[in-house]
Image: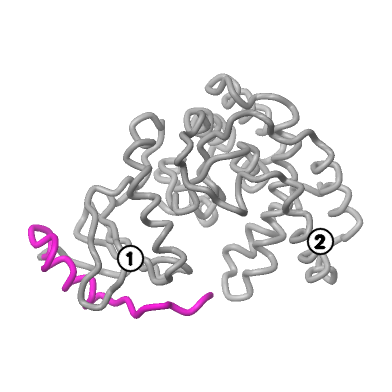
Amino acid sequence: MPAADVRVSLDLVRRLLVAQHPDVAHLPIEVMANGWDNLMCRLGDELVVRLPRRALSAELVVHEQRWLPVLAPRLPLPVPAPVRVGRPAFGYPWSWSIVPFLPGQVAARNPPADLWEAAVVLGRFLGALHVPAPSDAPANPYRGVALASRSEAVTTRVSQLESMIDRAAVMRVWEGAVAAPEWDSPPLWLHGDLHPANILVDCSRVSGVIDFGDVTSGDPATDLSVAWMLLPAECHGAFQDAYRAANEYAAHDDTWARARGWALALSLAFLAHSADNPLMAEIGHRTLDALLA
């Protein structure tokens, strides 16, 4: 886990609230998560304060502030669109957000009870999200790009992980995916980081999607890789059918072939960078097993 570029604390959160949002500053505050990119603090019963802890993530929070209020109204699942924006103050250098509290636990820890239903819900969600993006949508050099551009990283990670993976089998999957024709249509809106730790489950059902910091545009196959991360093979058809019913732009076979490659690339990234994050390591192992099954 990378070190914070600035110190973030409950005391800082309280001071920022008192100065900029005094009407909610009296509410109880408790730390929910201190992650790679952000400190997340529960604020009362209905709100969450989200403060970047690294310069890189500060830019991502600005993307959420700009674009989630645009995207949220047409999405069939709740997303944490900021309801208030905070400014730099007290030595804290970046914008920060107050977002709605979305109930539930992440699917990586609390899988949905009915995976067929989850497949349909996620397919409809991505079908609604994946529409043509404007020219000023955020750019991301690692997500939504041509799959072949990830070949060097995949090869490097295969070498790093050689003692724990079947190199030949992994490279067969990768080479098959890279052989698929690339996305040559207008770029579509993407979540950019859709994995089971960013999907909420409440009362045993998929209830929301969080962490849109990597929101970007490009090849929808990046997001569709979630099928191998969360769903058993027998539910992939339901996922694809729901997606096709909701999306007229990307429902062709080449997209699914590239999605398999994205699932592989992301699983290797999770495994290579999760020494202190057993949850992401578990997602990586599960995804790789599904791809090679």
Q: Residue under label 2, please give it.
A: 155
In this rendered view, identify the residue nearer to me: 113 or 185: 185
Q: Which mark is residue 94?
A: none
In what element is the residue under mark 2? helix
Q: Residue at x 14, y 63 (%)?
A: 20
111 vs 157, left or right, is: left
Q: Residue at x 36, y 43 (%)?
A: 68
Q: Give the alpha-carbon distance from disc 2 to disc 1, as whole Å.
A: 35 Å
Measured from the top left, where is residue 34 in percent x and y? 40, 71
Indicate yes or no whether the magenta region holds residue 96: no
Q: Residue at x 69, y 65 (%)?
A: 271
Q: Residue under label 1, please give it.
A: 51
Q: Residue at x 9, y 62 (%)?
A: 22
Instruction: Spot the residue most to the right.
Output: 168
Magenta-highlighted residues: 1-25
Q: Residues within 10 Å of mark 2 (few under 14, many from 20)?
A: some
| Kind of residue sitting beneath label 2 | Thr
